[in-house]
Amino acid sequence: MIFASAPGPLEPQTLAGLEQVLGPGRLLAGPEAEPFLTDHRQLYHGRGLVARPHTAGELARLLAFCNEHRIGVVPQGGNTGYCGGATPDESGTQLVVSLARLSRIRQVDPLNYSLVAEAGCILADAQRAAEEAERFFPLSLGSQGSCQIGGNLSTNAGGVHVLRYGMMRDLVLGLEVALADGRLLSSLTSLRKDNTGYDVKSLFLGAEGTLGIITAASLKLFPKIRCSATAFAAVPDPRAAVQLLARLREASGDRVSSFELVPRLAIELTTRHIPGVRDPLEAPHSWYVLCELTSSRAADPLDSMLTECLGEALQGGLVRDAALAASERERAAFWKLRETIPEAQRLDGASLKHDISVPVAAIPEFIERAGAWLRENAPDGRLIAYGHVGDGNLHLNLNQAPGADRAAFLARSEPIKRAIHDLVRDFDGSFSAEHGIGRLKVGELEHYAQPVELALMRAIKRVFDPRGILNPGKVLRRDAQ
Ligand code: FAD
Ligand code: MLT
Ligand code: ZN
């Protein structure tokens, strides 16, 4: 009986009840549960048991039981989230619910341009299923080999195609959700139009498991990408990058699907720490963009569109140098450089992360002002501002400078965060553009959200989860729920 080593103060009869609801082999404890108890960034280490239901019905029954016994439930997908949302607290009283066993693709409908996947389906598997049906599912993240559709929906994930296709919220047609009291909300339609009252399902998107547990989703597909052109271009500064984006959108008939900003330091860190990454250009430059045009028409002249636009930009001083990917291998090499920036940063030492957004046109001024403040107030850090500039979303991170004292650097994270986020507020921006709130940013939400917005969030939480069993303490502080 696994409960002999139960980690927390759950009553023995409650534990026995849990096992009965789930059936044999569905509940993990001790060393088997360990991998589920720490978040990806290793910021939190919790305690608790892990349930692995195999069907939506099983999950719904489990929730009914947990609601009756007031057991806190922490949904977990691929556990790649950045804000500790999928990790239980330290009390040992919470139950992690892993969605990994609900991983089927239920349906692919090429004519309707839609796909129905269960919540535990790995993102890369959903992309592959679409591809096999000659379609394209556009959500694309560095973590796509392990994050899950349910986690993507619950964090409203962004990634590198938002510019063209929107965030995860924009890719949803229908949802199936297990509610706190065990009812199953089946809103799994694949309709493009449905104006029948409140859009209840939309509340679960970005809710980080605090309002219900998503069990399946109907997602939008697009025509398969048959042609692409990718360039890695050096630009004089972020202002030039934003201007280049505007021109490229016009010149290409709005075929830009990615436009990512990369600073010099990112090239230095990736080439130093990640095997196989090389600087695509001969001379060093301060700033770069990785841009990609895509089309579903195999014969679209994207390469010439991109070359022409970059050539004009070179003459006009918006671009200093550029390399066009001449093969799929070169294209993959450009993307490897971009996607491994977070890993290179981690390997280089301590870092402070800020996932901010401001209007696209305000990005240059924001970088200038944040950079000036950091140079003066955090000289032991090196700014590495990179990411989805086409969406106005920057990962404005600070890496410990060589030789700096790690503990002293990390000890200043709070005042640095406050200064950056205050600046974001001055720009009418967001302190969490795509990574969510989880446990990490609960205080930031309380600090920056309008009181009326917070009050509405708390009221919504009470309607969906009156006993407060769903991901307690995430997004909203537990005592304020
Ligand atoms: P988890 O981490 O398991 O969970 C995230 C939250 O969702 C938790 O609150 C959890 O309780 C809840 N949850 C999970 N499944 C469900 C469900 N079925 N029902 C209800 N709630 C649920 N994010 C971006 O947005 N853009 C990026 O470009 C990006 N790049 C990344 C690159 C790397 C290398 C890594 C490691 C992460 C990156 N991320 C990025 C962050 C992360 O991958 C995303 O937030 C992703 O959507 C999380 O999915 P997951 O399945 O791992 O969710
Ligand atoms: C990215 O875009 O690379 C991620 O969202 C940021 C990160 O992994 O730190
Ligand atoms: Zn990102």
Image (tube, helix red, strand yellow):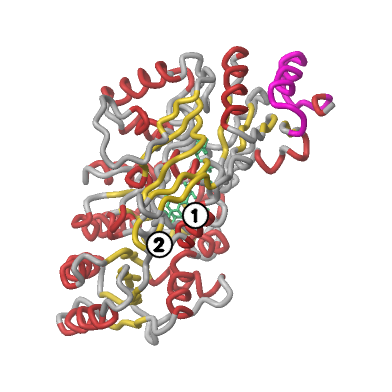
From the viewer's perspective, is residue 123 above or below residue 326? above
Query: What range of the chain is rendered magenta?
Result: 4-25
The amino acid type found where label 1 is placed reads Ser
* Residue 98 shows in this picture: yes
Q: Position of residue 401 (x, y in %)?
A: 48, 62
Q: Position of residue 348 (x, y in %)?
A: 55, 63
Circle number at residue 384: 2
The amino acid type found where label 2 is placed reads Ile
Residue 140, quarter of the rendered image: bottom left
Task: Return the residue nearer the eye: 43 or 158.
Answer: 158
Q: Quadrant of the C terminus?
A: top left
CB atoms at circles 2 and 1 under 8 Å apart?
A: yes
* Residue 396 shows in this picture: no
From the viewer's perspective, is residue 122 above or below residue 460? below
Circle number at residue 351: 1
Kind of element beneath mark 2: strand
Report the residue at 31% width, 65% height from top: 259
Circle number at residue 366: none
Report the residue at 66% width, 35% height from top: 52
Task: Return the residue nearer the eye: 409 or 262.
Answer: 262
From the viewer's perspective, is residue 343 above or below residue 72? below
How crowded is the residue under tag 1: few (<14 C-alpha within 10 Å), some, or many (20+)? many
Q: Is residue 95 left or right of residue 281?
A: right
Quadrant of the rendered image holding ligand 3: bottom left
Q: Position of residue 410 (x, y in %)?
A: 51, 48
Kind of element beneath mark 1: strand
Task: Return the residue nearer the eye: 135 or 210.
Answer: 135
Q: Is mark 1 within 8 Å of ligand 2?
A: no
Asked if residue 7 is among those painted magenta in the image, a careful observer would answer yes
Total numbered labels placed on residues in the image: 2
How crowded is the residue under tag 2: few (<14 C-alpha within 10 Å), some, or many (20+)? many
